[in-house]
Amino acid sequence: MTVEAIRTTPSDKPPAQPSAQPLFDLCAGYLPPESVSMIRQAFEFAAEAHKTQKRLTGDPYIVHPLDAALTVADLQMDPSTIAAALLHDVQEDCGVPNEELAKRFGPEVAKLVDGATKLERIPWLAPGERPGDQAIQAESLRKMFMAMAEDIRVVIIKLADRLHNMRTLDAKPPEKRLRTAHETMEIYAPLANRLGIWQLKWELEDLSFRYLDPDRYKQIAKLLQTKRGSRERYISQVERILNEELARNGIEADVKGRAKHIYSIAQKADRYAAEHKGFDEIYDLLALRVIVNTVGDCYNALGVVHGLWHPIPGQFDDYIASPKESLYQSLHTTVMALGARPLEVQIRTQEMHQLAEYGVAAHWRYKEGGPTNKNQQYTDRMSWLRQLLEWQRDMSQAEEFVESVKADLFRDQVFVYTPKGEIKEMPAGATPIDFAYRVHTQLGHRTIGAKANGRLVPLNYQLQNGDVVEILASKASRGPTRDWLNSNLGYVKTGHTREKIRQWFKKQERAENIERGREIIDKELRRLNLSLSEHGDEILAIFKYESLDDFLAAVGYGGVSTAHFATRLSPIIHKDEEPALPAIEGPAPPVQTHSVQVLGTGDLLTQIARCCNPVPGDKIIGYVTRSRGVSVHRRDCFNILHEDETERLVDVEWGRQGAAMYPVAVHIEAWDRVGLLRDLSTLASDEKVNMMGVRTEHDDDRTTHVYITLETTGVEQLSRLMAKMESVRGIISVSRQLDGHRRASGSL
């Protein structure tokens, strides 16, 4: 787009223009001649407008809109969308007024170009950029969804534009590659998935993964290449067996093997790693796709597959009876095929296959054809977009809208049933409380319990596909509890539910909210060894409140989320001069060379300083040692504050991978009882946190002090675990021990 255009001087020889004949041939396969003629005129106009421009790759600029148009034509979109894809940069990059486009190509094309241009002007936040400022990101998403609601074709053009930019991302500087890849993985690939456009979704994911984790991408690609021959022989054999069995049962079908893309394999490898399985144990790297003529044939073919190979329990999904929100329909089953290897089989009709590949793009032709059942299905299935915009109007903060989008929109779905048999589609991970608020706000306010499939379940139970959910409600509207807003406890997973609960608390008395907010803040600050009296002004500045009472009231009714409280307060420098309680000495943390970056230099050996044990989220600084590379300290570490050779201090920052583990000392005060340490260790194990060392001290009043050194991935995981520890029976307080004042622990 604009950032990639390089204008040449009039004396420069214009580069040779690429041929658009493949585009014209593709369009001629499904469009009438007059539509192809209009597309040809749009190409000629765009080529003339961009003739003095090049891309950063050195190619003529027209290569970019031409590739975007080819992607749109591959989706078999209408001629106006293809023409707009060709012209989508002439308004901003070439100064062509929208009125001229309307005069030449009609108001429909001009409107699509204008919509795509406005989307291009939207700024995006990269991860870690301007932390705490979500307003710009929220406005960006809001404009995106408003454009979608007005005309979905604008976003399809934007996806095609992004796909070509990702294909040519090598031309950008490294930091812009990472920013673009993050943005694509977080927004555009999930959006393509939500719209059901599989062709764009998988390629956007793979291209993003290639830049976000290049080493792992290459590793998986290499492993796939080495096993390619054996996989092809295996899939050819099962194809032949299934084809013969289907024909024997009188079912006409097209059976083909389908390769899983690299990013999906990486996700599967992560799931296998959690089960202590290696990459070599992932056998279902290929899937069989069976295309039949009718819906009845789908279920008949399923019976043939299950009769041929034993189905794996719990690995069957019927998306024909319960289609996904993206319009996707298919039967999915995993069976133990030849050699006792798991094999995924997808069964669908030809029409379902078109919708699976092209999603809402396939439905656009139904909209063009006037009112039909398919047109109504399209309208019904896009209701999630209208619902999202409705929720956005209720959001109390911009960051809550971003949170809602990522939680409710860009997450897999589960299908659950009411006791009357009505289907409700919920984001994966949703709880009975989310379900209750989705049914009706007042039902959510009156929720006191829940049943799934006739059995009582906790209110933070994660709903599963096929669950029949019954909400147990009080007769009076007693209202929600504030614990539901604590994301660490897992009661609420959707932004819609969270906002409804906040609105309820916001209506309560201000004095009550201030008092409750003070309790919450005091508890959070105690964990971080901070105090509201000493750091109040800094906290108000971070959260952008002028009045302490306004801030406390917002915390009390849930307007300020404490989910990432520790991370947002990490810039505050701790000035407490009281010596910290002694930490538990654990084994020395391993030397890390990839989780900390030394700014302004090449690769240097780094290691975490044991005197202050910083974790991701803390402000850090490096100290150049004489023989052990750079040691990384908290900026408020006693040794750093009293260092005489300041020239040996260097700026460092946390790296992007963040896979390392960091030891942190925690102090727990509790009433002594049998089983206390067992309960604490169980919580740590559930959170996948290692307890490196434990020491206890007992007081005469039957209280005990437990000092634990935990290995965590960062401040957020630590804060989440400490919140859960506070809910253990008998716990009085949990706080982090800042070890920066231990003079005797060694030099830098």
Image (cartoon, grey):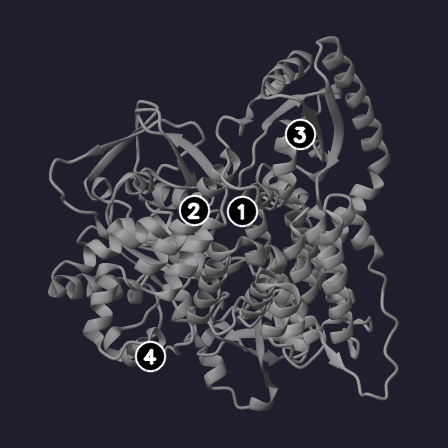
Residue appearing at x 40%, y 52% in the figure: 388
Secondary structure type for disc 3 = helix
Mark 4 or 1: the one toward you: 1
Instruction: Estimate the spatial distance between the alpha carbons at disc 3 and disc 2, rounded to whole Å.
Output: 26 Å
* Left or right of 274, for residue 146: left
Which of the 4 image quarters holds residue 734?
Answer: bottom left
Q: Say if mark 3 contacts mark 4, CB within 8 Å.
A: no
Residue at mark 3: 350
Task: Give the quarter of the figure containing the N terminus.
Answer: bottom right
Q: Which mark is residue 194?
A: 1
Residue at mark 2: 384
First in residue order: circle 3 vs circle 4: 3
Residue appearing at x 85%, y 78% in the figure: 14
On the image, the x and y values in percent for residue 721 come to 39, 52
Instruction: Estimate the spatial distance between the alpha carbons at disc 4 and disc 1, rounded to whole Å.
Output: 37 Å
Secondary structure type for disc 1 = helix
Residue appearing at x 31%, y 72% in the figure: 530
On the image, the x and y values in percent for residue 400 come to 37, 60
Q: Amino acid at mark 1?
A: Arg
Residue at mark 4: 541
Mark 3 or 4: the one toward you: 3
